[in-house]
Amino acid sequence: MSRYLVTGGAGFIGSHLVKLLTKEGHQVVILDDLSTGTFNSSLDKNIEFIQGNILDQDIVKKVFRNIEGCFHLAAVASVQESINNWHYSHQVNLTGTINIFLQASKQNIPVVYASSAAVYGKISDFPLQENGKVSPLSPYAADKYACELQAKAFGEVKSLKSCGLRFFNVYGTGQPKNSDYSGVISIFREQVKDGKELVIFGDGNQSRDFIHVSDVTNMCVRALSMVASSAPVLNVCTGRAYSINELIQLIDKIAVIKGIKYLPPQVGSINTSVGSPELAQQMLNYKATYELATGLLELFSVNL
């Protein structure tokens, strides 16, 4: 049995990761400010919950006691929120991450941290590869890429062992409908649930690389064995792009769609995003197993 810290452990991906870790028999310390997530203190005796912010260095120091690894998922995980509250989101997403890296380096604790496919911006050299170009186009994306650079600096200067994971479009149960990680799937689910038309911005031919949260958490756990002072970064994706129109066709097979409304494309929207999973498959010895149709059936069957 090991004891791990999960920052953001009450959030969407974090809560699924905590469940996986405890299922495997580990103890978990959660640090979360509950700005987006919720926590039931009676869930599991192997979970210690501490409410707090990663900007609080005293709390960060406290939660690093007696742990063997850190999964750093806490963030202001919204592009729009990073624009609306530029300074605060920068503090949390970059300064907060530096706080985590500093404490981890002092205690020689390995860190797996969440980066984002947003660092690629509108790069169109598909499939997107970790050693290719990046072009962050939002405060959120810029800070996520800066976290990767900081991880490399910490590895060089303080020998911190880390691994960064560039999450693509994560979806699954328990996801808030306003999440930037999947956006369209969680929004479509709410629109189906409420009996509303599905709203598409653009012609629906824009495509995304959707990956189920179960695959994401399994990759997080495996990444802990791949940490290094060279600060490797891996795509967390399937390598398969689905257009929004294809997504709707899959949903139409499992749910009642009232109608479809096409609106003008949103300013700054990315037409295509699909990553290469090859490096992650090689390093983690893991390939995403959830087919999108299976994941959608599971998701749309819950409380509709």
Image: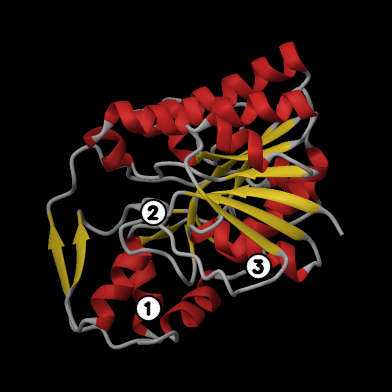
Q: Residue at x 68, y 18 (%)?
A: 154
Q: Count neighbours of disc 1 (C-alpha within 10 A) and say few if under 14, some if 14 to 19, many if 20 or more.
A: many
Q: Residue at x 28, y 88 (%)?
A: 256
Whether residue 138 is visible to the viewer of this picture, yes or no, is no
The Cα atoms of the two marked residues, 1 and 3, are separated by: 27 Å
Type of residue at label 1?
Answer: Ile
- Residue 101 place in picture, x, y as percent: 64, 27
Question: Reading the chain from its start, which is encountered first: label 3 or label 2?
Answer: 3
Q: Which residue is mark 3?
A: 19
Residue sticking out furthest to the top: 157
Residue 262, image quadrant: bottom left
Q: Nearer the viewer, mark 1 or mark 2?
A: 1
Q: Which residue is mark 1?
A: 251
- Residue 2 place in picture, x, y as percent: 83, 54
Residue at disc 2, secondary structure: strand
Q: Is residue 143 left or right of residue 230?
A: left
Q: Quadrant of the C terminus?
A: bottom left
Q: Which residue is mark 2?
A: 207
41 and 236: which one is in front? 41
Whether residue 56 is visible to the viewer of this picture, yes or no, is yes
38 and 21: which one is in front? 38
Question: Reading the chain from its start, which is encountered first: label 1 or label 3?
Answer: 3
The Cα atoms of the two marked residues, 3 and 2, are separated by: 30 Å
Q: Nearer the viewer, mark 1 or mark 3?
A: 3
